[in-house]
Amino acid sequence: RTPPPRTRWLSQTSSANPLLLVYTQSVFCIRSARFSVSEETEECPGQRRSATEKPERESRVGDSSTVGKRPHSSMSALECKEKGNTLYKAGKYQDAVEAYTEAIEADPDDHTFLGNRSAALLMLKKYDQAIADCMKATQLDPTYVKAYIRASKCHSQQAKIYEAKSVLSECLAKIPDCPEAVKEMETLTQLENDLSAAKEHLGTNDYDRATYYVDRILPLCPDSTEVLSLRAEMLIGREKYDDAMTVCWALLSKDRQNPDLLFLRGKAMLYSGQVDPAMKHFQEALRVDPDHQRAREGLKALKTMEKAKTGGNEAFKIGKCDDAIALYTEALGIDPRNKMYNSTVLCNRAAAKMRKREYEGAIEDCNESLKLNEGYIKAFTRRAECFLQTEEYEKAVRDLEKASEMDPESRDTQQRLRNAKLELKKSLRKNYYKILDVKKDADENDIKKAYKRAALKYHPDKWANNTDEEKDDAEKAFKDVGEAYSVLSDPQKKRRYDAGHDIEDIEGGCGGHGGFGHGDMDPNELFAAFMS
């Protein structure tokens, strides 16, 4: 071990001047005794600092000689090392770095002190400083295996596989067949293969297999922007957009000018339905790197979709439903993986089909829209409107109840639900409009014509020669026709019927029409009176 500076100087001068040696040794002893009780500390020979003055720290990044630097204490190098070990075990890594730094300053030629400090720096993720300590330790002791392994890990945790392998190769060149280095090299080779496999599966949109490899890689490379970017892309593929945005945001906080990260965060935003922020991210990625291919393609596709969708909306507003349907269909074919966007476009196309009274087609579009976005309230309410038009009232009520659960504060949905329930209640009664085969807005003359046509069709005399079963069916139908006419031909009864009142209440609470009441009249008498 190299002797301290004073000892080296004394040994060099002793042979040249014995008297000077005696004098200097005396002064040295006196000064040593003074310092043992003094309130001052010595940072280096010939330089003294007040004990109450705060030590000045240097912070030149990457220079391992200044890591955690502070003045020498009265503790020996080994005592500083033990203090550092205790702090390290307690998880106080920055304090451990400072303790190891004191040990290094007291004895700069002990490679283990550098090795210990590199371990603490590794835990603090100060990889460059840790690597510098490891390399310096290997210069002091070329057979110091731990330093090579630790430097390799500093590189591998950032997915710098080439650099990690280079360090291990240097170790194996000096210590052939070193078991630790061989094992670590095998780990790096497997890591390299897993990284290639993850990229390959992401390229083919096989996100399940990509997830398997990314999950294997991530614990070994927790601070690799490349690996975390792969994870963000995998999360997007698995439709976990919020998680993907969180990963990208954490990385962008360290590197705001990374075009790959800007693109990925924009893609996650787009697929979660945030169109405008997504477009801004694509544009920013291209500002940083005008040749970024994925950002350019993403921005182009988004602009094309927006143009087709906006054109469809404008056509719908002016009543050009066929043009609107064509434009919405065009927008749907641009990016099939964009579920949120396509869900909205499908719902818009359903509205255009509804205006054309193509209710079945509109229902199909709403079904597809809800497959892509099961929480899309507008698709539920729009499909409910279609079900009301096709007189599938139970389905309409079910959809509106679902929409009401999702947005309990919506008065519009609550009113629609009440109306649908009323229509369901009315549908459970006899449908007099269907019996007479007239529309709900039929006038008095239409109702009379419909009654005459239906009564003649089911009159008992016309079915006299049929089977008993056919006679019974015709008689029942003839009775229903008379009952329908008795209500729909009376404005007051019709009004109550349309309002959803029960038939018994309608017949019991209203008088007749046209000078005679026929609510309880025999259907044959009603027909005779009508024909007369």
Image (cartoon, rainbow, N blue to C red):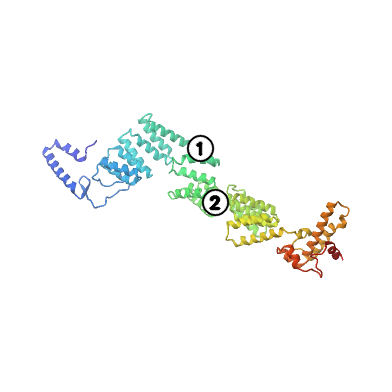
Numbered disc 2: secondary structure: loop
Which residue of the protein is positioned furthest toward the left in this rendering?
Answer: 19
Which residue of the protein is positioned furthest toward the top in this rendering?
Answer: 177
Instruction: Give the percent coordinates (x, y) of residue 82.
Output: 29, 41
Q: What's the amino acid at mark 2?
A: Ser
Image quarter in which the C terminus is found:
bottom right
Q: Nearer the viewer, residue 457 or 134?
A: 457
Q: Is residue 310 visible from the viewing direction of this image?
A: no
- Binning the other alpha carbons within 10 Å of mark 2 as few (below 14), some (14 to 19) or many (20 upward) gives many
Q: Which residue is mark 2?
A: 272
Determine the CA span between mark 2 and mark 1. 27 Å
Q: Which residue is mark 1?
A: 197
Q: What's the amino acid at mark 1?
A: Ala
Q: Nearer the viewer, residue 520 or 482?
A: 520
Left or right: 263 as drawn, with respect to 518: left
Instruction: Give the percent coordinates (x, y) of residue 310.
Output: 61, 56
Instruction: Give the percent coordinates (x, y) of residue 377.
Output: 60, 55
Left or right: 96 as drawn, with respect to 336: left
**Upstream in sequence: badge 2 or badge 1:** 1
For the point 73% across and 66% down, the residue is: 495
> From what the image shows, is residue 213 above or below residue 253?
above
Looking at the rendering, which quadrant does residue 489 occupy? bottom right
